Image (tube, grey):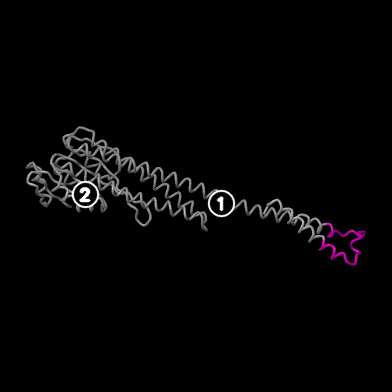
Amino acid sequence: MHAVSFDFVAKRIDVLDLAQVQDTIAAGGYCWVDFADLGAAGEFLDAIDIERPTIDRVLRNEHIGEVHLGRNCIHCTLVETACRDGELALDILHIVLGKGFIATVHAQPSALIVRMTETYEDDFYSTAESGGYLLFEIADHLIGGYRATLTALSTQVEDIQKMILGDIGDEILTDVSELTRALLDYRNAVVAARETIHELATRRSVFVKPSTQPFLDRQTTPLARLASDAATERAVLSETLNLYMGIVSHRTNKVVNRLTVVSMIFLPLNFLAAVYGMNFQNMPELGWRLGYLWFWAISAGVTVALLLLLRGRRWF
């Protein structure tokens, strides 16, 4: 648990324990509390009289993608994204806004919160006028994480594009399917975040100051671009798969063409072998002294003639 209080007039930040947070809120101060434990977060929210439905949503830890306006708070969820070991990871971050506090809750380590703890003090001393600046911090770092994730996913798309020109098997179909699904999950997370931030930027509430809302509304623009870029990457991946299938089809056609050429050469040879493989007694060629040599000479002549004909027609 990480907790601090802000004095926007005296420009002062104090580190608090959980008991001091409740006292500070009761005294009219403003606090930011971060929980990495859902149970502890539920107990804290219950202690400051947050309604039960909000607490239950936090404890369920589901990404609902909606902004819930309660009697004494606003609850919303965002999804952080990251690429870990080449796979997309989705981490849920709950935000609870109330009178005199903002609480962030996550069941797993949050890269967004780590980055936020490194910058919130500098931004507090330079520009902050109310607790709403923390919302801008969250949105800013969330977008930064989305950009980094999209860059990693785009690199994987480029790697697949390079692979299709090499010696690659059907495993590329699995790679493309998984990456397509990851891009879809990423885009859904970005779109949900855009809608959530837009809702906070436009809905009238005592928990989000009007002076903060224009800054939040500007953050919806880069989120819309990121969602569009993710859709573009999916389209590129789809075209890459189509190109791979075209290459496979071309290679198959070349193999079939070679087999056809071989079949055309051996077809007359098979005919000759079948004729002279018969056991009729009155076949005059069987009595020729040079009959065997003539058979091979005719076979060689037929083969050369067919090869020249096929070569002239550019069939191989």
In this orientation, does residue 169 appear?
yes
Q: Position of residue 66 (x, y in %)?
A: 28, 37
At label 2, the amino acid type is Gly
Q: Is residue 161 left or right of residue 114?
A: right
In this orientation, does residue 64 appear?
no
Circle 1 residue = 248
Q: Position of residue 311 (x, y in %)?
A: 70, 54
Residue 67 higher or lower than 137, as above or below: above
Gap in Å between the C-alphas at discs 2 and 1? 54 Å
Circle 2 residue = 39
Going from N to C along the chain, the mark reached first, 2 or 1, is 2
User: Dot 2: what SS?
Assistant: helix
Q: Where is residue 238 in the image (x, y as percent from the top left)?
A: 47, 45
From this viewpoint, which residue is outermost toward the top? Answer: 204
The reply to whether the magenta stretch includes residue 69 is: no
Image quarter of the C terminus = bottom right
Q: In this view, does 167 lie to the left or right of 226?
A: right
At label 1, the amino acid type is Val
The reply to whether the magenta stretch includes residue 284 is: yes
Q: Is residue 203 left or right of residue 86?
A: left
State the residue at coordinates (17%, 41%): 132
Q: Which span is picked out in magenta?
A: 275-297
State the residue at coordinates (36%, 43%): 187
Toward which corner of the image does residue 273 lie, by quadrant? Answer: bottom right
Q: Where is residue 52 in the image (x, y as percent from the top left)?
A: 20, 39
Estimate how packed mark 2 is, as few (under 14), some (14 to 19) or many (20 or more) residues with alpha carbons within 10 Å. some
